[in-house]
Image (tube, coloured by chain):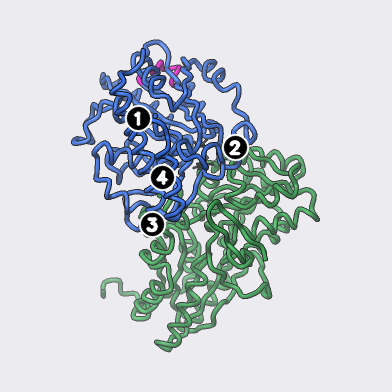
Amino acid sequence: MSIAATEKQRLADLAKELRLNIVDVMTYSGGAHIGGSLSIVEILIMLYFRCLNIRPQEPDWEDRDRLILSKGHAAAGLIPALAMRGYFPLEQLKTFNHFGSPFAMHPDSRKVIGCDASTGSLGHGLPMAVGLGLGARTLKKSFKTVCIMGDGECCEGSVWEAAMALAHFKLTNVITVVDRNRLMIDGGTEEVMALEPFAEKWRSFGFEVLEVNGHDLDQLADAFDRAWSAHDRPVLILANTVKGRGVDFMEGNVKWHYASADSSLAQKARESIGRQEGGI
Amino acid sequence: MAAVTGTTWTCYDSSTMTSREIYGRTLAELGKTNDRIVGLSADLAKTTAIVHFADAFPDRFFNFGIAEQNMFGAAAGLAKAGLIPFASTMAIFACLRGGEQIRTDICYQNLPVKIIATHAGISFGHAGTTHHCTEDLAVMRSFANMTVIAPADGIETSKAVRACLDIEGPVYIRIGRGFEPPCYENENYDFIPGKAVEMHAGTDLTIICCGIAVLQSVQAAKTLLEQDGLSVRVLNMHTIKPIDKEAVLKAVQDTRRILTIEEHNVVGGLGDAVGSVIAESGKGCVFRKHGIQDEFSLIGYAEDLYAHYGLDANGIISHVRRMMGMEFEADENWEDD
Ligand SMILES: Cc1ncc(C[n+]2csc(CCOP(=O)(O)OP(=O)(O)O)c2C)c(N)n1
C-alpha cells in the first residue's frame, strides 16, 4: 500500500520547504542542531501534514494527537514545521535564539504554540509519553501520542524504563519513533556506545518493530498507518535515516551535529537542497 | 598558541579564552604524571574538552554514551578500584540527572571523584531552559563530603583542577560554556580551596562573588571608585563549600554592607551560604543576594541575559549604589519602617 502520487508530491514539496526553513533557522539563530533536524524532516512532515489529528487554530484542543520531540535539540526542525502548519507566522522564526524569543535550541512548551512538551534533556520524552498514554486511557480518549527519539538518546536508562512500561501497560496509543541516523556527538553510535542488536532489543522489550527508510514517504505512511491501528503490542518505528540529509556536504558527517552558518555557507546548503530529486 | 576549531569557526589564543579548553589541557598534563587519573564523559567529550585527555590517554578514557547515571555510578566503582576519576558533562546533567549517583555512590562513600561540569548558569542561554543550570551550587552544597568550586576564569580553572587532586573526597567544579573573558592576568596568586581571594580593596561595601561575576564585579568596583568615590571590596569566593567564614566575617566587620553576586538561583547558592555565616555571627549588616531571582531564565545569548539580569558590571553598579542608601537597623524596634 502506498500513498497517491499527488499526495506524495505534496509531502515531498513540504519536506523540501522544511529543509530550506531549517537552513534559515540556522542562519537566524547563530547556530542550530542542523544534522539531527534534517534527518527527521520526512517524519515531521508525515506527522504534521498527514497523520496527526490536530487543530492549529485551537492548539490546546484536548482531544488532539500529541507529538513529543524527545530529541529536543531538533527544535530547529520542529519549530519551522509548526510554523508551516499554521501555528504561528514563519516570519517569527527570525527571533530564534535571540533575547526574549519563544524559540531556543530546545523547545519550550509554554512558549512555543503547538509544542506538546518541553524537551532537550535526553531520555525524558518517552516517560512523558507513557503518562499521556495512560492519561488518554483513563479519560477514555482516543488521541495518540507520538514520541520521536534519537538513537544516541537510547543510551539513557529512562528510555528503557519507559519501554518496559509501554509494553507492560499495553499502551498501543503511544507510537515510538527512533531516528536511527547512527551518529551522536562524539562519533558513531556503535563506536561510542553500541546499540546493536537494536531492533532485537526493542522486540525483546515487547514491541512490534517496523523498520523503514525514514526518508521514504511511502514506507513512512505505511508504518504510521499500521502503528495507528496497533492493538496488542506497542509499535516502534525504527527509521533508518541519514544525519544532515538533503545537504550533500553535511550528510553522514558527525561534525554537523551542531553548526552555525554565514550567508555563503547557507547558500551552498540551499543549493544542495534545491538539487534534490522531486519537490519544488 | 593553541587554536581551537569548530565546524565553521576557529578560536585562536584559546589559552586565555576558554575555561573548558584550559581544563581539558590541564587534565591531559596531569595525566602524564599521575597514572591513576581516568577520564569519563557521556557523549560530551568534545563539548566539555575532556577530549584532550581522551586523545592523550585513550586507554584511560571511557565514553558512556548519553548515560549520565551509569557514568557517575561507574565513576564510583573506578574510585573504589583505586583510580581518580574526572567526569565531565554539562552541569545540569551532572547535578540533576546524575544527582543521586553523585550523592549516594560518590559522596556517601566519600570517593575521590572529580566532577568538572560545563555550561553552568545561563552561559548556554540560547539553548533554552533544559540546558540552563541555576541549581547546581544549591544541590552540590547540600551533599555532605562534597567540595564545591566555581572558578572565575580559565587560569583559576586550571588551578582548581590541579588543587582538587589534593582534596581527598569528591569535588564539583562548575565552569561556563567556554567563552568567558579572562579575569586574572597571570597565575601569580595563591589558589587555596576554601580561601577567598581579594580582587579589589575596599571599606564601604563588599561584593562576594564567584564565576563570571568576579570580572564584572572588579570592573564595577573600579568604576564606582572613579565615578562615586566609593571604596568597594571584591572577594572572589571561588570555593562555595567549605565557605571562607573568616573572610565573610572580616568583610562584615570592615564594611557593614555585603552584596553577593552569582550566576545561579538566589535560593541555595553562594548568597545563602554567605547569608548563613552572617546570620550565625549575630552581627548586623546590610545584606543583599543578587542572581537569578527564583525563576527560569529567559532565552537568549548569555551576554544579553547577563545584562538583563544585572549580572554585568552595569547591573552590579546599580545594585551597589542602591545599597549605599540603605542602613541596617541597630535598634530593637521592628515597627519603625
Ligand atoms: C541528558 C542529556 N545528556 C546530554 C545531552 C547533550 N546532547 C545533546 S544532543 C546529543 C547527542 C544526541 O544524539 P542522538 O540522540 O543520536 O541525536 P541525533 O544524532 O539524531 O541528533 C547530546 C549528547 C542532552 N541534551 N541531554
Quarter of the image for the C terminus of chain B: give it: bottom left
Label 3 element class: loop
Q: Label 1's element?
A: helix
Marked residue chain, label 3: B
Closer to us: mark 3 or mark 1? Answer: 1
- Residue beneath label 3, please? B300
Q: Under tag 4, what secondary structure?
A: helix
Q: Is residue A168 magenta?
A: yes
Q: Is residue B244 visible?
A: yes
| A65 to A94, vertically: above or below | above
Q: Amino acid at mark 4?
A: Arg
Label 2 residue SS: loop
Q: Kindly indicate whether the residues beneath marks 2 and 3 are on one polypeptide chain.
A: yes
Of label 2 and label 3, which has the lower sequence position?
2
To which residue does mark 1 refer? A12
Q: CA distance from mark 2 to mark 1?
A: 34 Å
Amino acid type, mark 2: Gly
Residue contact between numbered discs 4 and 3, judged by CB atoms under 8 Å: no
Q: CA distance from mark 4 to mark 2?
A: 32 Å
Q: Which residue is mark 4?
A: A270
Q: Chain under label 2?
A: B
**Which region of the structure is painted magenta?**
A166-173
